[in-house]
Amino acid sequence: MSLLMVVLTSALFAGLVATCATVAVERLGGKLGGVLATTPSTIIAAAAGVFIASPTEEAFQSAMSATPSGMLLNALFLWLWRLLPPHLPKWGLGARLAMMTTLSLSAWLLGAFGVVTVLAPIRAAGDIRTLLWIGAGVTATVITLGLITSRDAATPSSPPRPVPLGVLLARGLFAAMAVSVAVIWSRLGGPLAAGMASVFPVIFLTTMVSLWLSQGEAVQSGAVGSMMLGSTAVSAFALTAAFALPAYGVVAGCALGWLAAVCFVSLPAAAWVRRGR
């Protein structure tokens, strides 16, 4: 399959999945919906595309090993959406949202540059095992943060309102763009950068923006903890896929990774936040 076809197929799938995922938070509320909305979705398209485009098995595993570090950045990205809003200037809705988006994305990009810089020497030495162990340790860290923050989150009582169609379309478009960049970078020999691009916070950013616009700041703040906890399912998928795709192929490997992530992370996380409710 040509690189163009891999990019287009992965981007289309990612866009469709990302467009549908917001409904979970909208219908089920910030806490439970936050967990379900973070089950592995766009990472499936990214993993499949990166696997097909990667020149070697080691390059694919390097990309997947960087995913947990990217999810740690995403957890910190989400935490900023709870921490910063009370301290923003008392401007209008649009200005406050624009400032919040700029600050959170800037922090993520700075962190991503730092992660790639730190992991690059390990990747250059060919020490894939160390990269995977780092990924496992980072995943455990994010789980701990998610457990703490999801317990502290308040659940707003305001009734849900539908997310604007424009936000849904934008979510799909940006998800498709992020996955496309990840696949292209994997072919150009930048597996760590590809792994970071595959977890660019499209889902989290568009969820926070859509909830801010349609439900208010309280709902998006309440979703932060559960989304941090649920997002570790993406890391679990990536670490499983690092071995499953080379061993079983794209379809069976992605299915195995998704089942492992949902059974061992998403479902227990959903039970945790339901108990908290």
Image (cartoon, grey):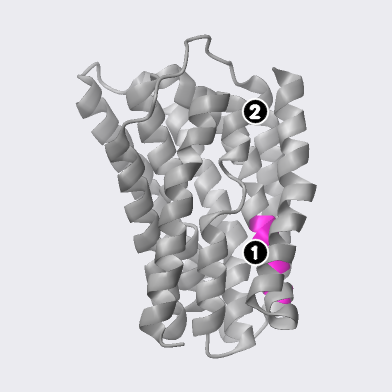
Q: Amino acid at mark 1?
A: Ala
Please identify the residue farthest to the top as the structure is shown.
157
Q: Residues within 10 Å of mark 1 (few under 14, many from 20)?
A: many
The residue lying toward the viewer, choosing from 233 and 110, is 233
Q: Is residue 182 above or below residue 108?
A: below
Q: Amino acid at mark 2?
A: Ser
Q: Nearer the viewer, mark 1 or mark 2?
A: 1
**What kind of secondary structure does the magenta stretch mostly adopt?**
helix
Q: Is residue 79 above or below residue 236?
A: above
Q: Is residue 33 magenta?
A: no
Residue 273, disc? none
Residue 238 rendering spot, x and y as whole percentages: 64, 64
Is 73 displayed left or right of 238 in the figure? left
Quadrant of res 132 = bottom right
What residue range appears in magenta? 235-243
Q: Residue at x 31, y 23 (%)?
A: 88
Q: Residue at x 60, y 26 (%)?
A: 31
Q: Which residue is mark 1?
A: 238
Residue 271 rendering spot, x and y as whole percentages: 77, 31
Q: Earlier in the sequence, mark 1 or mark 2?
A: 2
Residue 63 rendering spot, x and y as whole percentages: 56, 73
Q: Is residue 210 above or below residue 127?
A: above
Q: Which residue is mark 2?
A: 150
The residue lying toward the viewer, choosing from 166 and 62, is 166
Q: Residue at x 39, y 25 (%)?
A: 162
